[in-house]
Image (tube, rainbow, N blue to C red):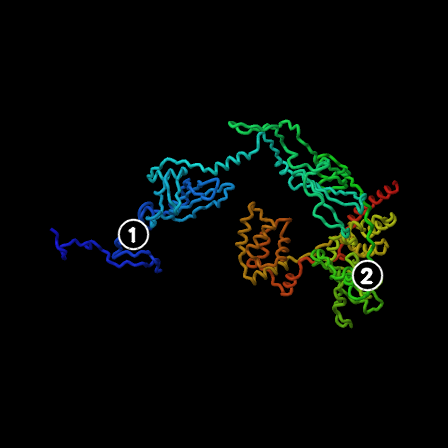
């Protein structure tokens, strides 16, 4: 008996239900409202009648299986299947259907599928990726679900977008993976034959060359001689024909494939049209045939007979002896020699010369050494000199010359390499004016010569109460040598570095200047670049002294002996200079100065060590430097052998590490005073600079400034030094013996 449908008499399905919320399409994800599901379920998330929701996961629901996500656990793992599908061909004569083979890839990380069709030669079908990688839904009516790993098996069909694919085989990884999942794999299925593909294979098989096949391998020659071309300079004498002349040609022989090409050299204003090539690149036969061969007349093989039967098909008999073959001789590299002839399709081309690479090739391969070129044309007539009109006085001579060299004048070119190389090199000389005026005679000028552009500037030192305004006397510019004609066609000569030396007389702005001295940099530069400046070349000067007569040489030796009664080997510079200048030996004042600088010795002045120590202690006292015990401990630590001495380099490194507040020149001078060779007595050095334990007497501020800002060793001038004439005599005797030997040799000849 049925119970009435009254409260308390029917089963309440909501008794165990806990959720009574109204389902929504939206939810919050990381604080952002977004669409959660496209289909809305009922109360409490229950599905409505007949409602189906697509699962989010293909096989395993969330919370089951491995703890790693799928894109990590199955990364780079793909199942590969071989498949085919049949496609109808309704409008073709040779085929009614086509079997198309493909590969199906299933990516385990996200259940995506990709179908790829291998490319076949001359198929005429766009092949490659047939279906791009994505999740493929099942065929209707289950199109709300997607293919997963359990839908794959061998020898079964799959419908992908209305195309039926038959899985025939898979790789070993796929078999092992599916077996571990518990899938029982079917046996592999064969692929049916494609009638059109079989027909194409038969056609290609008939197109293969007949055996025995003679292969000519030219790859080795190509790899060994690729980009190697022999170049010959030739000519073709066509003077016998009407309006013919001598044609210059260039022959290129390619060693990679034994081909050659010929180019014609068309001279300007010859009246001929320029053609790309005289002969295109090809093999050139030695004996030009009377007429061209017909196609098929020259073949690599000869067919003797053709016969066939219904059972065995057609057969061929080839002439293995090649009795009817036609052989042609082509030009090789051994046939091309200087003076040889080349038959270019009936034209007699003579080889006259070749380039350096071709000469080296024939010299190494064939041992040919004679490459004398043929003279086939008269030497070119010398070009007539271009007469330049004389300078008219407007602008500079270089600028006026550019107007005569072209319709569009260009500014004169400067020597940029010389400018970059000698931009900062300036030679400075002290000069006096050569005049009878007593006031101008005492004026002192500084002449600067700039090596970058050979320009000269003159500056005069201003002197008080002299009546002459000093300053710039001549602005920097190139100065012409005196005694040249102004309006002439040739370029004027300007003063160069070889014209400036001590004792030279320069005419600048109609004023004569005598160079009386030069600074140390100028003298050092001239001696360093003695090849460019002969006046500073010691070898040339000694050669001049060695070429003197024996009477003058005895006079020089006598003078040196008289001026050195103690036989020390040294004489004063001034006495030797005055003697050479009064001897009239042909040496300039600068050459005498260079000779004395080469053999002079300067004595270093005695330096007051106590003054230097007092100045150093005064600096330490003002800087409050008291780390002398730490400095002594470091010196003792580096002294491994406990000798009380360290090398100069080690002492300088330790002083720099302690940041001693001493100038570099003062520290170097102190170390030299406490050193013996390359070693420093660091105990004495520390005792001298320690102002705490060994204070020195106070010094005046003037003495400190003089010692700090003046060089410790002031260089002595040459006229204050002594000349080592003993070394000079040794050098002079060697030059004299060499000159005597050369004279005797010339007389003997």
Which residue is tagged 2?
481
Disc assigned to residue 222 = none
Q: CA distance from mark 2 to mark 1?
A: 112 Å
**Residue 584 falls in which quadrant of the image?**
bottom right
Seen at 71% across and 40% down, the residue is 358
Q: Residue 609, percent across and down?
A: 64, 57
Residue on which disc 1 sits: 52
Quick one: 709 or 235, which is closer to the camera?
235
What element does badge 2 sit on?
loop
Left or right: where 674 falls relative to 546: left
Measured as percent of width and height from the top left, residue 38 is found at 33, 56
**Mark 2 or mark 1, which has the lower sequence index?**
1
Query: Left or right: 705 with respect to 372?
Result: left
Dots 2, 1 in contact, CB < 8 A: no
Is residue 734 something that shows in the picture? no
Residue 300 or residue 286, whichever sits in front: 300
Quadrant where the C terminus is found in the figure: top right
Q: Residue at x 74, y 35 (%)?
A: 368
Tag 1 secondary structure: loop
Task: Specify the farthest residue to the left.
Answer: 1
In this orientation, which residue lies closer to the viewer: 634 or 380? 380
User: Is residue 395 in view from this perspective?
Assistant: yes
- Badge 2 crowding class, 10 Å Cα cut-off, few under 14, some 14 to 19, many 20 or more, is some
Left or right, 195 with reference to 563: left
- In percent of width and height, residue 12 lies at 17, 54
Q: Is residue 21 left or right of residue 163?
A: left
Up-down relation of residue 101 to residue 523 (above or below): above
- Around disc 1, counting alpha carbons within 10 Å, would you say few (fewer than 14), some (14 to 19), or many (20 or more)? few
Q: In which image quadrant can residue 363 be found?
A: top right
């Amino acid at each position: 008996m049925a119970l009435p449908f009254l409260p308390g008499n029917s089963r309440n399905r909501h008794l165990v239900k806990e959720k009574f919320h109204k389902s929504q399409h939206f939810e919050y994800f990381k604080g952002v409202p977004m669409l959660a599901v496209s289909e809305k379920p009922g109360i409490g998330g229950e599905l409505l009648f007949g409602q189906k929701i697509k699962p989010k996961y293909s096989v395993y629901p969330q919370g089951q299986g491995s703890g790693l996500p799928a894109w990590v656990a199955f990364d780079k793992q793909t199942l590969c299947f071989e498949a085919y599908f049949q496609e109808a061909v309704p409008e073709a004569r040779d085929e009614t259907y086509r079997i198309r083979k493909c590969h199906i890839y299933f990516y385990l990380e996200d259940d995506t599928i990709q179908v790829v069709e291998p490319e076949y030669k001359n198929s005429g079908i766009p092949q490659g990726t047939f279906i791009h990688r994505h999740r493929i839904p099942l065929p209707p009516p289950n199109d709300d679900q997607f293919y997963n790993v359990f839908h794959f098996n061998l020898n079964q069909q799959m419908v992908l977008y209305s195309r039926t694919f038959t899985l025939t085989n898979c790789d070993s990884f796929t078999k092992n993976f599916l077996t571990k999942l518990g899938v029982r794999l079917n046996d592999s299925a064969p692929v049916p034959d494609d009638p059109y593909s079989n027909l194409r294979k038969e056609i290609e098989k008939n197109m293969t060359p007949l055996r025995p096949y003679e292969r000519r391998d030219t790859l080795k020659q190509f790899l060994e001689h690729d980009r190697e071309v022999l170049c010959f300079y030739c000519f073709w004498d066509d003077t016998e024909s009407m309006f013919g002349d001598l044609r210059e040609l260039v022959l290129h022989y390619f060693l990679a494939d034994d081909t050659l090409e010929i180019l014609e050299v068309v001279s300007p204003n010859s009246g001929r049209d320029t053609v790309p090539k005289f002969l295109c690149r090809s093999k050139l036969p030695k004996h030009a045939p009377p007429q061209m061969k017909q196609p098929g007349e020259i073949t690599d093989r000869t067919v003797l007979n053709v016969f066939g039967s219904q059972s065995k098909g057609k057969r061929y008999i080839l002439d293995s002896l090649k009795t009817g073959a036609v052989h042609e001789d082509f030009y090789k590299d051994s046939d091309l020699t200087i003076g040889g002839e080349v038959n270019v399709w009936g034209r007699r081309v003579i080889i006259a010369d070749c380039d350096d690479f071709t000469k080296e090739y024939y010299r190494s391969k064939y041992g040919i050494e004679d490459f004398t070129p043929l003279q086939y044309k008269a030497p070119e007539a010398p070009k007539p000199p271009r007469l330049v009109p004389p300078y008219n006085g407007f602008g500079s001579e270089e600028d006026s010359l550019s107007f005569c060299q072209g319709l569009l004048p260009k500014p004169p070119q400067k020597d940029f390499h010389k400018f970059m190389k000698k931009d900062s090199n300036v030679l400075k000389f002290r000069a006096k004016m050569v005049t009878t005026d007593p006031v101008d005679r005492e004026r002192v000028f500084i002449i600067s010569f700039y090596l970058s552009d050979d320009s000269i500037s003159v500056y005069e030192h201003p002197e008080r109460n002299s009546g002459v305004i000093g300053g710039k006397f001549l602005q920097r510019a190139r100065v012409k040598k005196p005694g040249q004609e102004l309006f002439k066609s040739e370029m004027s000569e300007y003063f160069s570095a070889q014209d400036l030396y001590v004792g030279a007389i320069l005419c600048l702005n109609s004023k004569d200047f005598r160079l009386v001295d030069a600074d140390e940099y100028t003298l050092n530069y001239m001696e360093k670049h003695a090849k460019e400046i002969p006046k500073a070349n010691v070898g040339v000067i000694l050669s001049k002294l060695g070429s003197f007569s024996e009477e003058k040489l005895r006079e020089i030796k006598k003078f040196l002996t008289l001026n050195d009664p103690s036989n020390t080997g040294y004489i004063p510079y001034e006495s030797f200079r005055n003697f050479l200048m009064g001897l009239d030996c042909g040496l300039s004042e600068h050459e005498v100065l260079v000779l004395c600088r080469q053999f002079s010795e300067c004595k270093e002045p005695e330096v007051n060590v106590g003054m230097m120590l007092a100045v150093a202690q005064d600096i330490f006292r003002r800087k409050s430097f008291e780390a002398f015990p730490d400095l002594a401990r470091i010196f003792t630590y580096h002294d491994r052998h406990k000798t009380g001495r360290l090398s100069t380099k080690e002492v300088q490194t330790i002083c720099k590490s302690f940041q001693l507040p001493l100038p570099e020149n003062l520290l170097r001078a102190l170390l030299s005073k406490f050193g013996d060779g390359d070693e420093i007595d660091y105990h004495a050095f520390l005792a001298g600079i320690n102002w705490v334990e060994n204070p020195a007497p106070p010094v005046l501020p003037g003495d400190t400034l003089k010692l700090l800002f003046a060089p410790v060793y002031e260089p002595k001038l040459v006229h204050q030094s002594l000349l080592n004439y003993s070394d000079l005599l040794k050098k002079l005797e060697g030059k004299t013996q060499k000159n005597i030997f050369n004279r005797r040799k010339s007389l003997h000849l």
